[in-house]
Amino acid sequence: MSDAITSTDAGFPAKNYLIEKITVSSWLLTLDHKRIAILYLVSLLAFFLIGGLAALIFRIDLMTPGPEGKLLASETYNKFFTTHGIVMIFFFLIPSIPAVLGNFLVPIMVGAKDFAFPKINLASWYVFMAGGVLALVATIAGGVETGWTFYTPYSTMYANSNVILAVCGAFIAGFSSIMTALNFIVTIHKMRAPGLTWFRLPLFIWAMYATALVILLGTPVIAITLVMIFVERVFGFGIFDPALGGDPVLFQHLFWFYSHPAVYIMILPAMGVVSEVISCFSRRRLYGYKVIAFSSLAIAVIGFFVWGHHMFVSSQSTFAGLTFSFLTFFVAVPTALKMLNWIMTLYKGSVRLTSPMLYAFGFLGLFVIGGLTGLFLSTLATDIHLHDTYFVVAHFHYVMVGGGVMGFLGGIHFWWSKMTGKKYPEGLAVFTAIVIFIGFNLTFFPQFQLGAHGMPRRYHVYPEEFQMLHISSTTGAMVLGLGYLIMAVYLIWSLVKGKPAGKNPWEARGLEWETDSPPPTHNFHDIPVVRHPVYAYEYESETSMEPEKT
Amino acid sequence: MNLLFKLLPEQATEYARQVDELYLFILAVSVFFTALFVFLMVYFTVKYRHKAGSTEKVEPPHEHYTPEMIGGGLLLALLMVMFFWGAKLYFKAQRPPADAMEILVTGKQWMWKIQHPSGKKEINTLHLPVGRAIKLNMTSEDVIHNFFIPAFRVKNDTVPGRYTQLWFKPDKIGTYHLFCTEYCGTEHSRMGGYVKVMSEEEYENWTSGGAGADETPVEAGARHFAELGCIACHGAISGALGPNLAGVYGKEVNFSDGSSLVRDDDYIRESILNPQAKLVAGYAPIMPTFQGQVSEEQLGHLIAYIKSLE
């Protein structure tokens, strides 16, 4: 064995990407994918904070049914939930895992020095920030109150707020997604290390690949749709407003053609993270590697044919309703197979309950609820009752927060030591994961009950009988906020005081664990050659660079 | 507090009870799979947990794709039960019985304007007789709204520029929530009120009572039909410039471009506002548009009148 096996080596590399150069311009003009990932991480956390605080404020407001004794005026309330939606969807969830973990890990996991197009990668961050700043200006300078869905003709002809600015923000941010996706696809195709065949790729890479496909195919459609809002609102071209000869439902088709696949942009990367984490902490190759890999692609493809399930009561035809309901059930199958394979990986494994593993379990537990409650909404008759109620709100938070955010946090914990070279306090992290899990359920589980009883979403004033459940939900939101706060404290603390992590603190397999923590600017000292299957936990050696054993 | 212990709100139609059966079926399936999944997760985690100091090597999994594919197939079969069950009820909700009493509903920011067949109007409250099939013919004056009655388990968007329907047959006297569930602006959450289901007798008293005898939608439609001059071309006169409208509703019509359509509410509405869009075969494109001259409510009345012509 070479001295590359350094799982117990606690040294902090003297030269690494973080301290190679420490001027401001070396960060702002960097072409290093790892530094760009850090730029994204810091900006996304800022957006997450803004989106989270908006939610906390309107949740506090919702503790009283009103109309008397409210914290916010109805108009302000509408602006808060719109801000929460726009910021969280376009400026946190969609970019979260791809732009941070994907940017950091894709080149390393494929054994490359960087992406195929490092300058496009840097440009994507600037484009993203330009879009984000526009959206924030829209929010601060008067606000937007259309909801993140921008339904017409409300958004084009009736809303008296900064719709145009917010639409421009989302439009511009879309291009950063496209640039990132382009880099992922080209890099995964062309820059894999010698010996790294498609079926030796970690499933995180497969997930990133599927996500990139969805982004490339879907984002142009939302871009065009947002342009249509712009021209109708600014120039009065009749596209969606029936008073101008337009069709308001056309907007919904265009919007959901992107925004339904966008759910998979948020969830597929989280599934990729969970695959890595479960494999590592079961010390075992994932069960059904190919099933998981191809189900990611299947979800990406089927996801483009189900948008009409958002529109069962939109006046779309009975036939369209039937077709979309039917197709929607097909998404459930690859998703269920993934869940089964993750569970089967634990079977006869060697399971370790570390903090990343708790987040992965959190993902599984919450996503199973998020997925199954989706059945109520894909079934026509039950959806008609539940559509646009809190049931839907709870469902998509279980998927996008219970799935997407849990995956993101699990990934951040799993690769934190790789990104920063430092260890965070594991005990506190385990505690926080539990706090977040409890807070999340306390917030969103009661919302299923609210929705089943008919409480509509986006309601500022509501009947008194719903108050108890709203109070529970708000309490949960505070617990959740507390969890995030503790996490922020210990992660920042670890940057300063954390112990050096060493190359491979989790004793994981994969190319990223064979280089220093934090890695050198060009990722590897020598170009790695891959000689083992992926997740080679059964091999004595901890490095895939070892010559193959016969 | 009873929200914590009751799964679903009050049921005031037979359809609501049928939807709830389906809801409970999906709930049972969901609870079963959640429990199974969590049980396996916990059981495997405990049984195969890493023991400190253990150096036992883990074997890589032996994968069996056939059971996975069979499992996926069985799952799909179970899901198809949900699909067909849901679709069957959906068909029912989409097809009002022929004898349903028609009530006109117009949504606008932020109120529901309702007119009964007797001509009686009300806002944000819907009075209904128990035991009769009711069909709402709905539209919107401005943005998209949604008419939602949780106790009936039905809702539908009201879309500007077109008509949508909702039907139900309340079988339980009581007062139920009426909500707007499509976000429509500042006072969205105040756009609603109550549905009051009363006995047939009470409903008759209510609908015929109040200030003077209201003009019924059909009567109002007949008045507009004369006042707007429609009658000059669309009356029962031979050699008229436009098609005679008696008895045409719900029948197929051929257009000059060779296409055809069943005359429905949306078609009549379009023909009033944009007459050249679909020209009936054999007639010249001479009808002027009435865009801007008739309100949503007047359109509703005209359609009700044309439907009533025999």
Image (cartoon, coloured by chain):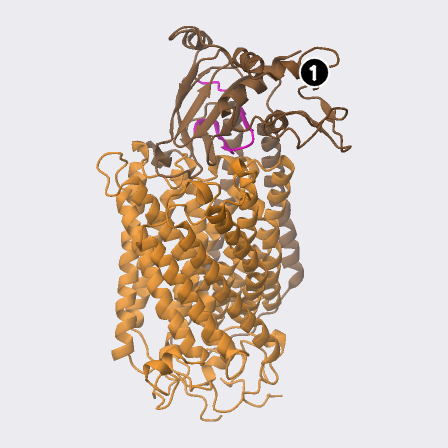
For residue B211, which quarter of the picture? top left
Residue A29 horizontal/vertical position (percent): 40, 80
Q: Nearer the viewer, residue B124 or A373?
A: B124
Residue B33 seen anywhere in this rendered image of the structure: no
Shown colour of chain A: orange
Left or right of residue A119: residue B64: right
Residue B157 magenta: yes
Shown colour of chain B: brown
Residue furthest bottom in the image = A2
Q: Which residue is mark 1?
A: B244
Name the image quarter holding the C terminus of chain A. bottom right
Q: Name the residue at 54% across, 12% down.
A: B223
Residue A27 horizontal/vertical position (percent): 37, 80
Q: Secondary structure at mark 1?
A: loop
Q: Nearer the viewer, residue A277 or A194?
A: A194
Q: Name the residue at 58% across, 31% down.
A: B89
Q: Number of marks in the image? A: 1
Q: Name the residue at 29% across, 51% down.
A: A56
The span picked out in magenta is B149-172
Left or right of residue A35: residue A67: left
Residue B273 horizontal/vertical position (percent): 58, 28
For residue A504, above or below residue A268: below
Q: Nearer the viewer, residue A329 or A83?
A: A83
For residue B20, above or below residue A95: above
> What chain letter is assigned to the residue under label 1?
B
Q: Nearer the viewer, residue B16 or B284?
A: B284
